[in-house]
Image (cartoon, rainbow, N blue to C red):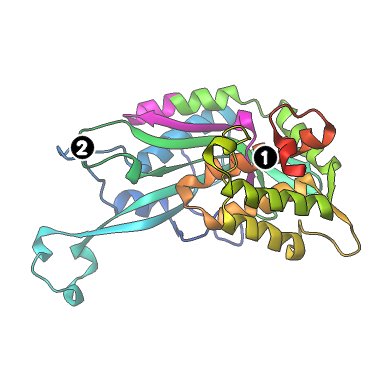
């Protein structure tokens, strides 16, 4: 294995791609100071460190040199070593406590692949998320679930633009070798030199919506949540909740990068996508972030097709 950058850059050099209720952690701390949970019979799970290591190795072999990986974690689970069983909580020392983080997300960039979309610099990024809560540790050993992705990253506001060919969804692996094999297959299937995905995102900047259309979309998103399941099922799937919709609305008014500019009467769908990505980034657990950002991309692309009269999936409902 070649030398990979597994440290963590300073926030000044590389702003965190997601914060919410998470905290940054170095690869060394994740692998050396955290225990690895086991299943009920004592079988080890696939560690978060192994997932990162295998994914980075696959990405470097496919795309070339990577930036240092950035890792964020949440939901700390603590325990005690046997020697500290009888100590009171106030007497515990660091060496008495065991820790593992239930949820983890990581990301890095391909150094040689950058582009400009609608005036914003974007980078090809590699990453993934996992949550031990999906591994059902109380039962027999099962494959570990994780989500790996390759897509374009907007540095100005730390948003991920995940196009359909850039997001893998959930994969299941038993070993580090499984992760490497499936990550390699994903990365080889996504050709960053093809401009299809970038052109799709770039094209969002040429389609604009008026304030009236924006208000219709927001109103319909709220109505969508109240519809019976039978009616929702015939419409495109949308997983934006009240909190995210509120943040999109607030961003429309006050976001300096992607909100409504002074003197303007419309925003582009590119800007709408960034407002939606920013909203779900702030409100979602890190292991749900990928699915929600993918859904934002699908939704805005659907709105564009509805505006252009080429929609066949029902997105025009959000504009009527």
Q: Residues within 10 Å of mark 1 (few under 14, many from 20)?
A: many
Say above or below: 275 vs 12. Answer: above
> Is residue 167 on the magenta stretch?
yes
Mark 1 in CB contact with mark 2 (< 8 angstroms): no
Residue 312 occupies quadrant: top right
Residue at image coords 81%, 59%? 260
Q: From this viewpoint, is residue 145 visible?
A: yes
Point out residue 24 in the picture as x, y percentages from the top left corner.
46, 58
* Number of marks present in the image shown: 2
**Foreground pick, 147 / 180:** 147
For the C terminus, which image quadrant? Answer: top right
Magenta range: 159-181
Is residue 23 placed above or below 109 in the rendered structure? Answer: below
Secondary structure under badge 1? helix
Q: Residue furthest bottom?
A: 90
Nearer-N-terminus badge (1/2): 2
Q: Which residue is mark 2?
A: 139
Q: Is residue 89 magenta?
A: no
């Amino acid at each position: 294995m070649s030398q990979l950058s597994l440290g963590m850059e300073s926030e000044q050099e590389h702003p965190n791609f997601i914060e919410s209720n998470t905290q940054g952690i170095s690869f060394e701390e994740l692998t050396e100071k955290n225990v690895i949970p086991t299943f009920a019979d004592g079988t080890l799970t696939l560690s978060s460190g192994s997932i990162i290591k295998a994914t980075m190795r696959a990405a470097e072999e496919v795309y070339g040199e990577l930036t240092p990986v950035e890792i964020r974690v949440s939901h700390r689970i603590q325990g005690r070593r046997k020697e500290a069983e009888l100590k009171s909580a106030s007497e515990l020392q660091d060496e008495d406590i065991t820790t593992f983080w239930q949820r983890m997300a990581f990301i890095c960039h391909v150094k040689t692949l950058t582009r400009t979309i609608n005036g914003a610099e974007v980078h090809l990024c590699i990453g993934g998320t996992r949550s031990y809560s999906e591994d059902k540790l109380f039962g027999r050993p099962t494959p570990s679930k994780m989500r790996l992705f390759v897509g374009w990253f907007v540095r100005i506001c730390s948003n991920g633009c995940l196009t359909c060919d850039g997001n893998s969804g959930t994969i299941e692996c038993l070993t580090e070798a499984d992760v490497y094999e499936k990550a390699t297959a994903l990365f080889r299937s996504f050709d960053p030199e093809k401009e299809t995905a970038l052109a799709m995102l770039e094209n969002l900047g040429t389609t604009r919506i008026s304030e009236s259309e924006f208000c219709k979309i927001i109103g319909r998103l709220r109505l969508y949540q109240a519809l019976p399941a039978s009616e929702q099922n015939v419409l495109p799937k949308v997983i934006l909740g009240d909190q995210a919709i509120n943040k999109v609305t607030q961003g429309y008014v006050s976001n300096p990068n992607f909100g409504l500019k002074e003197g303007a009467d419309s925003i582009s769908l590119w800007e709408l996508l960034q407002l939606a990505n920013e909203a779900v980034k702030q409100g979602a657990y890190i292991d749900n972030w990928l699915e929600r950002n993918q859904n934002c991309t699908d939704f805005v692309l659907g709105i564009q097709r509805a505006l252009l009269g080429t929609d066949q999936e029902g997105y025009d409902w959000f504009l009527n």
